[in-house]
Amino acid sequence: MAAAFISMLETPGVEFEHDAKVEAALYLLDQSPSADFADCLLVARATHLSRSRFVTFGAGAARLARGELLQ
């Protein structure tokens, strides 16, 4: 899946809402293979917004940087 996103990022005429967030999410996904892309994208957005933490119900997402499991 990451390869497909990278290919789209490099394709002229294909635009994402915010390329930098997608790239950051792909980096997180590469660093945390047990995470899923949606969680990585949410963490990238939280980081972009300078949030100190990312609260989630997902145990996998809580293992990401700034992740905190809501119990």
Image (cartoon, rainbow, N blue to C red):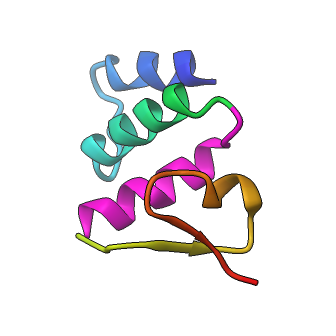
Tell me which residue sits at (64%, 24%) in the image: 1
Q: Is residue 53 above or below residue 31?
A: below
Q: Position of residue 63 (x, y in %)?
A: 61, 53
Q: Is residue 31 above or below residue 17?
A: above
Q: Nearer the viewer, residue 44 or 5?
A: 44
Q: Nearer the viewer, residue 5 or 51?
A: 51
Asked where in the image residue 13 lies, by quadrant, the reply is top left
Q: Nearer the viewer, residue 50 or 21?
A: 50
Q: Is residue 13 above or below residue 67?
A: above
Tell me which residue sits at (52%, 48%) in the image: 40
Tell me which residue sits at (33%, 48%) in the image: 21
> In this view, which residue lies farthest toward the bottom?
71
Query: Which quarter of the rendered picture does the C terminus lie within?
Result: bottom right
Q: Position of residue 19 (x, y in %)?
A: 28, 41
Point out the stretch of residues depicted in magenta.
34-49
In this rendering, position of residue 68 left or right of residue 71:
left
- Residue 68 in magenta? no
Q: Position of residue 24 (x, y in %)?
A: 35, 40
Tell me which residue sits at (45%, 32%) in the image: 26
Magenta stretch, overall SS:
helix
Asked where in the image residue 68 lies, by quadrant, the reply is bottom right
Asked where in the image residue 70 lies, by quadrant, the reply is bottom right
Q: How many labels were placed on the picture?
A: 0
In this rendering, position of residue 7 left or right of residue 38:
left
